[in-house]
Image (cartoon, coloured by chain):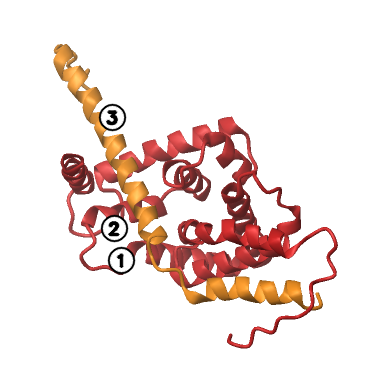
């Protein structure tokens, strides 16, 4: 869009252009995180980006209700998650398709040189119940405290804790017995390769 | 019948515990890596377009 016409200030007495600018300045660095969270919900990168963009628009439209200085990351994640589930409710059939796409995409790796273990972790994650996967991602990868994850998922802190621990156990078991769908690999290979990679990483660090 | 776990060697038990912890840590490291993979991707232009359009809407009628 090259035609950015500067018009007279908006008739929005309480909200200034500086407020919008401050809001935007905080929102922009969150975009990569919103994309990553959307990817874990949708799987399919294209619909994940659609979801993240919708969430961004929603966040922008609701900017007046955001209290600057509070946790914008948690706020936008909550918007994104609500958006995801309301779309899902709107079209259950579509969500079934999304789920299949998610599982396919979680299996697909763009980078052919990506370590095998990541591929297997993707598949393991795809096998978890959605609420467990979500909790584990928020706490284990998104850097949220249990309390924040509980707020994002609109549930009790204890519920998040138990979902995370169940997810960890299940993932561990899936990777350990190679219960994920991958033909021709023997049990425990995934865990072995994850451990090997982790060891390598820890020696590098 | 299932044989009871031979729980004789406390050193072995400690090692098993360490291994379990190591495994959980390994999964944690991987999980963050999986997430960060996407975080580190370049953000498609459309995302910034949305904010640009948002500015226009804010500046325009709405």
Q: Secondary structure at mark 1?
A: loop
Indicate whether A99 appears above or below A157.
Answer: below
Q: Which mark is residue A119?
A: 2
> Residue A104 in the image: x percent, y percent?
38, 66
> Which is nearer the eye, B55 or A137?
B55
Q: Which chain is red?
A: A
Q: Give the alpha-carbon distance from disc 3 to disc 1, as whole Å.
A: 28 Å
User: What x and y, as percent, mark residue A136?
Assistant: 45, 43
Residue ID at (57%, 50%): A73
Q: Which quadrant, please, contains the N terminus of chain A? A: bottom right
Is residue A150 rendered to the left or right of residue B8?
A: right
Q: Is residue B36 left or right of residue A155?
A: left
Q: Which quadrant, please, contains the C terminus of chain A?
A: top left
Report whether mark 3 lies on the same chain as mark 2: no
Label 3 close to label 1 by CB (< 8 Å): no
- Name the residue rendered at 58%, 87% in the picture: A2
In screen coordinates, is A12 left or right of A205? right
Identify the chain of the residue marked 3, using the numbered disc in the image. B
Whether residue A140 appears in this view of the structure is yes
Q: Nearer the viewer, residue A41 or A140?
A: A140
Distance Cα–Cα, label 1 vs label 2: 7 Å
Depth order, front residue of A185/A141: A141
Q: Is B21 located above or below residue B54 in the figure?
A: above
Q: Is residue A92 left or right of residue A133?
A: right
- Answer whether residue A89 is visible to the viewer in this image: no
As helix, strand or loop, the secondary structure at mark 3 comes to helix
Q: Cβ–Cβ below 8 Å for labels 1 and 2?
A: yes
Q: CA distance from mark 3 to mark 2?
A: 22 Å
Q: Colour of chain B?
A: orange
Q: Which residue is mark 1?
A: A109
Q: Which residue is mark 3?
A: B21
């Amino acid at each position: 869009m090259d035609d950015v016409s500067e018009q007279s200030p908006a008739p929005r007495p309480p909200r200034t252009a500086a407020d919008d600018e401050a809001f935007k300045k905080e929102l922009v660095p969150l975009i990569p995180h919103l994309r990553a969270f959307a990817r874990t919900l949708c799987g399919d990168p294209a619909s994940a980006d659609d979801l993240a963009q919708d969430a961004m628009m929603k966040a922008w439209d609701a900017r007046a209700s955001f209290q600057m200085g509070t946790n914008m990351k948690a706020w936008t994640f909550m918007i994104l998650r609500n958006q995801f589930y309301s779309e899902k409710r709107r079209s259950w059939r579509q969500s079934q398709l999304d789920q299949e796409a998610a599982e396919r995409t979680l299996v697909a790796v763009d980078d052919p040189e990506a370590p095998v273990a990541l591929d297997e972790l993707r598949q393991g994650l795809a096998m978890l119940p959605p609420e467990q996967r979500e909790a584990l991602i928020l706490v284990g990868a998104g850097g949220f405290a249990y309390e924040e994850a509980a707020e994002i998922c609109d549930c009790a802190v204890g519920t998040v804790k138990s979902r995370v621990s169940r997810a960890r156990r299940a993932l561990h078991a899936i990777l350990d017995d190679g219960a994920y769908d991958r033909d021709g690999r023997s049990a425990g290979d995934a865990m072995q390769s994850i451990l090997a990679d982790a060891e390598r990483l820890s020696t590098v660090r | 019948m299932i044989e009871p776990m031979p729980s004789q060697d406390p050193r072995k038990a400690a090692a098993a515990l360490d291994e379990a912890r190591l495994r959980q840590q390994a999964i944690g490291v991987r999980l963050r890596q999986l997430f960060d993979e996407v975080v580190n991707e370049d953000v498609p232009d459309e995302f910034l377009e949305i904010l640009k359009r948002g500015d226009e809407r804010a500046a325009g009628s709405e």
